[in-house]
Amino acid sequence: MNARLDPVPAAIPPARAGIGLRAPHYREILATRPDSGWLEVHSENYFRDGRPLWFLERIREHFPVSLHGVGLSLGSAGALDAEHLRQLKNLIERIDPGLVSEHLSWGAVDGRHLNDLLPLPYTAEALGRVCAHIGETQDFLGRRILVENISSYVRWRHDTIPEQEFVAEVALRTGCGLLLDVNNIYVSAVNHGFDPRAYLEAIPGDCVEEIHLAGFDEGATCLIDTHGRRVSEPVWQLYRETIESLGPRPTLIEWDTDIPALSVLLDEAATAQCILENMNAPHAHFRSLPPKGVHASLGAAHREA
């Protein structure tokens, strides 16, 4: 592994919007170097040598980069995957990311990975387990990580801790940062019938180091976090209120299915950038959150596990 001096600092700009880097846009980003504050990638796609890692190293010469994991399964009952951690640490050393994040979820059993990010049971036992895994991860990597709240469609019958309090306690116990996904909060709020603003009020603002925004689809009985369309207007409004409360935070536009032209992602990021730069100015073009009753029929049918 060859060390190199990078002309672009690793730090993610605190008041800039960025976009998720996806394979269809590698060449265009290198050729045009668009006005994006930073880029984020899914860590696991770059664990091995190959064209994706080659492109990431070239792009890292011009942009700050964050690493966002989807496969560590911090909430699993079993041990963390030591090889996964080793590969993540190697990638960190190679790319020098500004931020490293994972999901507050589980998705692996006995070495088998599920194709989803599944919600934890919000209990004292699960809290202790996930905090231990986060501590182990931070110790091994030698750095603070961020953990992201997920969207969900089911809940555990034996939950004893409200999700937002669980998320807050994880950060306070472990010293990790929070990646606050505003779209996930809205999707889960609709699906389970809670107030997204009350969720935000319970989150320790000083722990929030990054924000995610994405689009959802509307299913027959719930909202589905597809990351396959533009950010919805209710989520934009919730994001604006979040920034007004917390102050500017690095904000990422996620888009993982039906990936559009790069110009569409940059346009979404420009909207987020406008909010970051004008958080105290009126935004008449944003509608407020849907009135009570809108989307309520979707959440009424949510299931328990």
Image (spheres, grey):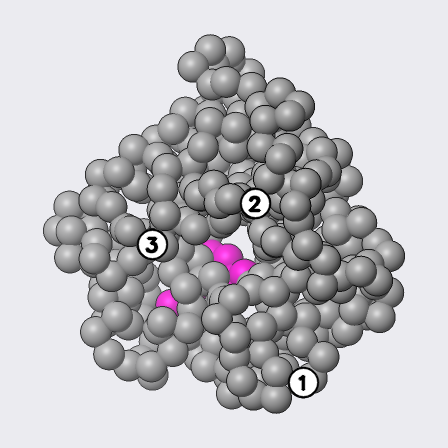
Q: Residue 224: where, in percent of width, then height?
A: 50, 48
Could you tell me which quadrant the C terminus lies in? bottom right
Q: Secondary structure at mark 2?
A: loop
Q: Rounded to the nearest whole Å, what is the CA distance between mark 1 and mark 3? A: 31 Å
Q: Residues within 10 Å of mark 1 (few under 14, many from 20)?
A: some
Vertical relation: 285 (above or below) 35: above
Tell me which label, 2 or 3, sits earlier in the chain.
2
On the question of residue 61 being in view, the answer is: no
Tell me which label, 1 or 2, sits earlier in the chain.
1
Could you tell me which quadrant the N terminus lies in? bottom left
- The residue under label 2 is 221
Mark 1 or 3, closer to the camera: 3
Residue 293 or residue 122, whichever sits in front: 293
Q: Amino acid at mark 1?
A: Ala
Q: Which residues are magenta?
A: 95-101
Q: Secondary structure at mark 3?
A: loop
Give the residue drawn at x 74%, y 47%.
Answer: 164
Give the residue drawn at x 42%, y 36%.
Answer: 231
Q: Amino acid at mark 2?
A: Thr
Give the residue drawn at x 84%, y 54%.
Answer: 161
Q: Secondary structure at mark 1?
A: loop
Q: Rounded to the nearest whole Å, what is the CA distance between mark 1 and mark 2? A: 35 Å
Q: Amino acid at mark 3?
A: Thr
Q: Which mark is residue 79?
A: 1
- The residue under label 3 is 257
Residue 172 included in the magenta stretch of the image: no
Q: Is residue 241 left or right of residue 271?
A: right
Quarter of the image where one finds residue 157: bottom right
Q: Residues within 10 Å of mark 2 (few under 14, many from 20)?
A: some
Vertical relation: 101 (above or below) 275: below
